[in-house]
């Protein structure tokens, strides 16, 4: 019996009735967290035409195709927008010259 279920909100299609999409059931917290992160990572890459982390986050918040929520017990500390912000910042991080 699965412990965790991922449901994703699709910001790109909220007005068309496709707002919630089932993204699977997972036995372990690691598997559920991994899948949720994969969904956010792929959504950010699909939006890829941004010039900055701030712009990418604005696009994700308005048009992101994946905003996963993890349901189950014990509750997992995963917030899609917080994770997306971390990833967006990392994508635009300029390595120091040296």
Image (cartoon, rainbow, N blue to C red):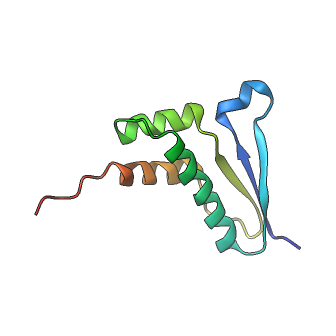
Q: How many marks?
A: 0
Classify residue 71 as left or right of residue 48: right
Seen at 77% across and 41% down, the residue is 20
Q: Residue furthest top?
A: 15
Seen at 75% across and 36% down, the residue is 19
Pick the quarter of the image with the C terminus.
bottom left
Q: Residue furthest left?
A: 98
Location of residue 14 by image quarter: top right
- Relative image position of residue 7 (x, y in whole percent): 75, 51
Seen at 57% across and 46% down, the residue is 43
Residue 91 at least partly seen: yes
- Relative image position of residue 40 (x, y in whole percent): 57, 51
- Relative image position of residue 66 (x, y in whole percent): 64, 45
Pick the quarter of the image with the N terminus.
bottom right
Residue 76 at least partly seen: no
Seen at 39% across and 37% down, the residue is 54
Classify residue 93 as left or right of residue 27: left
The relative height of residue 91 versus residue 72 in the rendered view (above or below) is above
Classify residue 86 as left or right of residue 30: left
The relative height of residue 73 versus residue 57 in the rendered view (above or below) is below
The relative height of residue 74 versus residue 47 in the rendered view (above or below) is below
- Relative image position of residue 31 (x, y in whole percent): 68, 71
């Amino acid at each position: 019996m699965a412990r965790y279920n991922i449901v994703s909100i699709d910001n790109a299609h909220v007005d068309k009735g496709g707002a919630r999409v089932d993204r699977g059931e997972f036995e372990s917290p690691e598997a559920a967290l991994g899948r949720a992160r994969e969904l956010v990572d792929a959504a950010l890459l699909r939006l890829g035409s941004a010039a900055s982390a701030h712009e990418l986050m604005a696009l994700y918040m308005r048009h992101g195709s994946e905003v996963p929520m993890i349901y189950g017990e014990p509750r997992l500390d995963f917030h899609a927008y917080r994770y997306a912000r971390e990833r967006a910042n990392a994508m635009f991080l300029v390595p120091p010259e040296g």
